[in-house]
Amino acid sequence: MLVQGTGGVSIFGLQIASALGARVLVTSSSDAKLERVKALGAGEGINYARTSEWEKEVLKLTAHAGVDHILEVAGGKSLAQSIAAIKPGGQIAVIGILANFSSDFPIFSLLLKQVILRGISVGPRRALEDMTRKFEQLQLHPVIDTVYPFGDALAAYDHLYRGAFGKIVIRVTG
Ligand SMILES: NC(=O)c1ccc[n+]([C@@H]2O[C@H](COP(=O)([O-])OP(=O)(O)OC[C@H]3O[C@@H](n4cnc5c(N)ncnc54)[C@H](OP(=O)(O)O)[C@@H]3O)[C@@H](O)[C@H]2O)c1
């Protein structure tokens, strides 16, 4: 599996996949963050700021097989890179649009590889309940970068904009 970046969505993706026994590759713009993801079970890290063609590195690390799943949080040109890095028959879950709302990607590769491209929005309550039950079983806890009091909500959004490692929390009560 491949997760992109070290924000809240991707870190949770890494935690879930690695708790279920998957080998997880992580991309990040920061070497320091790539060190931190190892403690959460990441197999290998790729610095996408230094290695802009990160999909080639993914292929190298997987003996040119590609990965089974990608959590796509960037959009834009990253989607074409994900199609290059995925295994035939693999799934790309498009959950975020951090880079660009439009994308130009090779339809022929998508077709030849029989890639499953799935848009992800919020799920039903039952899925959330199933997930939290599983989290309890696996003893999986969210990685929280910083908790801000409600009065500092603007600083919390600034932090999110700069890039957090895991989740940013705004405490609403207490
Ligand atoms: N569909 C849904 O239901 C749903 C739910 C929640 C969130 N989202 C969306 O999912 C996306 C991620 O959410 P989040 O809460 O994880 O955001 P976040 O915490 O703000 O994630 C920011 C991190 O993403 C990485 N990143 C930024 N631009 C990137 C790029 N071009 N390529 C690769 N990585 C990049 C960076 O990691 P490094 O610092 O390591 O480089 C950055 O620190 C957002 O677009 C959000 O709106 C969707």
Image (spheres, rainbow, N blue to C red):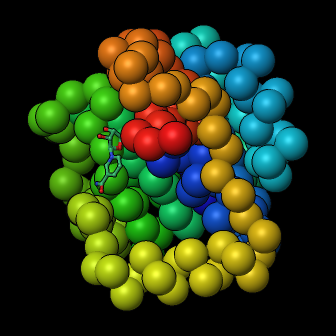
User: Quick one: 86 or 29, which is closer to the camera?
Assistant: 29
Relative to 118, is 103 on the left or the right? Answer: left
Q: Residue at x 57, y 31 (%)?
A: 147
Residue 66 placement: quadrant = bottom right
User: Quick one: 108 or 48, which is closer to the camera?
Assistant: 48
| Residue 51 coordinates in the image, percent (x, y) | 59, 19
The quarter of the image that holds ligand 1 is: top left
| Residue 25 coordinates in the image, percent (x, y) | 68, 47
Q: Residue at x 46, y 53 (%)?
A: 71
User: Quick one: 174 or 91, which is closer to the camera?
Assistant: 174
Quarter of the image for the N terminus: give it.
Answer: bottom right
| Residue 171 coordinates in the image, percent (x, y) | 47, 37
Q: Residue at x 74, y 28 (%)?
A: 34
Relative to 103, is 84 on the left or the right? Answer: right
Residue 54 placement: quadrant = top right
User: Quick one: 12 or 34, which is closer to the camera?
Assistant: 12
Height in image: 158 above or below 139? above
The residue most toward the front is 174
The answer, for residue 6, to whether it is visible in the render is no
Height in image: 8 above or below 23? above
| Residue 131 coordinates in the image, percent (x, y) | 53, 78
Height in image: 86 above or below 8? below
The answer, for residue 106, to whether it is visible in the render is yes
Q: Residue at x 61, y 46 (%)?
A: 11
